[in-house]
Amino acid sequence: MKTIILDEPRQFRLTETDAPGRPGHGEALVRVRRVGICGTDLHAFKGDQPFLTYPRILGHELGVEVIDLGPGAESTGLRIGDHCAVEPYLNCGVCSACRRGRTNCCASLRTLGVHTDGGMREWVILPATKLHKAPGVSLDHLAVVEMLCIGAHAVRRAALPPGAPALVIGAGPIGLSVMQFAQLAGAQVIGMEMSDRRTEFASTQLGVQDWVDPRHEPVEALRRLLGGDLPLTVFDATGNPRSMAQALHYVEQGGSLVYVGLVQADIPLPDPEFHRRELTLLASRNATGEDFAHVIGQIAAGKVQLGPWITHRATPEEMLDEFPNWLNPDYGVVKAMLEL
């Protein structure tokens, strides 16, 4: 089967590998139709993804078709021919986190395309429980579900008070997903971004109208927007250590700071300021099956419009040349899609 392997940083290889056999108990064989390109993939290509080893088959944002079902898999409700989004977090099911329903932070979690080989290949066998069927949702949009779940999970973690102001730092794909679900939760969303292109996209497609530039007295700008207050909740979706350290200064007394982005660095926090404000600091990692069900439901209900998000496409042959361009901010990528 056709397979793309990242042998080392900045070195993809398109090759043929053996097709998988029949699925085992509780498993499904799926045909990969779409692979969304994520920040994790970009970092893996650059060589600074903290949990990845090489060589690796990337790809965890997947739109797939069910080809075969192993014994017991039909009990999940799956049928051959179903189109599904993939929950790419392979959890053990027995550790303390799993027993408490926190499958997204399982003690031995393996994420497709990071800790184990992912979906940049024609077929793959997966646990049937990790497939979320979505009748009427396109393959393109199924491959964006996982990205949206990252934002939806962060918003659920934050327990946003309806109507309260929430600042989202970074308007890349993950930041956009946070904005989308913060809006659906009823928050007053403010964006912080340096890129005019990203600001325009979020303003046009999501209707986010209040913006702050972090280079120009952002604390004062936030207070002007909010009548002297600061946002009650701040999400940092940049994966930038400087931004993540600075984000604490944008949170109102008694508010919450949510780190959605991941970076291979230590983040310094001024403890006196942290205590003075009695802040809540949250990490948000991956998502759960509950988040997948919620996101698919919102897409099916027409509350999330994804058409404009997919700005670039490539076949496997084209991707080898195109992928380096997708790292360039001037290339205008919001979401790139690999078509298999």
Image (tube, helix red, strand yellow):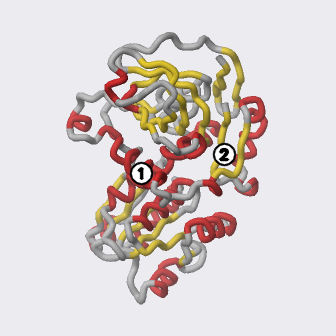
Q: Secondary structure at mark 2?
A: strand
Residue 75: % across, % down: 32, 25
Which residue is located at x 64 percent, y 65 percent? Answer: 201
Answer left or right for 88 relative to 8: left
Nearer the observer, 307 or 103: 307
Q: Quadrant of residue 255?
A: bottom left
Q: Which one is earlier in the sequence, the residue at label 1 or at label 2? A: 1
Q: Relative to 334, is 255 above or below?
A: below
- Percent from the top left, x then y, of residue 93? 27, 29
- The quadrant in which the N terminus is found is top right
Q: Which disc, if any, is residue 245?
A: none
Q: Amino acid at mark 2?
A: Ala
Find disc 1 in the rendering and name its residue.
297
Graded by Cα atoms within 10 Å as few (under 14), some (14 to 19) or many (20 or more), the crowding at tag 1 reads: some
Amino acid type assigned to the residue bearing label 1 in the image: Gly
Quadrant in which residue 313 is drawn: top right
Q: Is residue 129 left or right of residue 221?
A: left
State whether residue 51 is above or below residue 334: above
**Left or right: where does residue 54 sit relative to residue 13?**
left
Nearer to us in this view, 331 or 29: 29
Q: Residue at x 35, y 43 (%)?
A: 288
Residue 28: tell me if it is visible.
Answer: yes
**Residue 275 at x, y percent in the picture:** 27, 69
**Mark 2 nearby-residue class (10 Å; few <14, some 14–19, many ≥20):** many
Foreground pick, 239 / 134? 134
Residue that numbered label 2 is attached to: 336
SS state under label 1:
helix
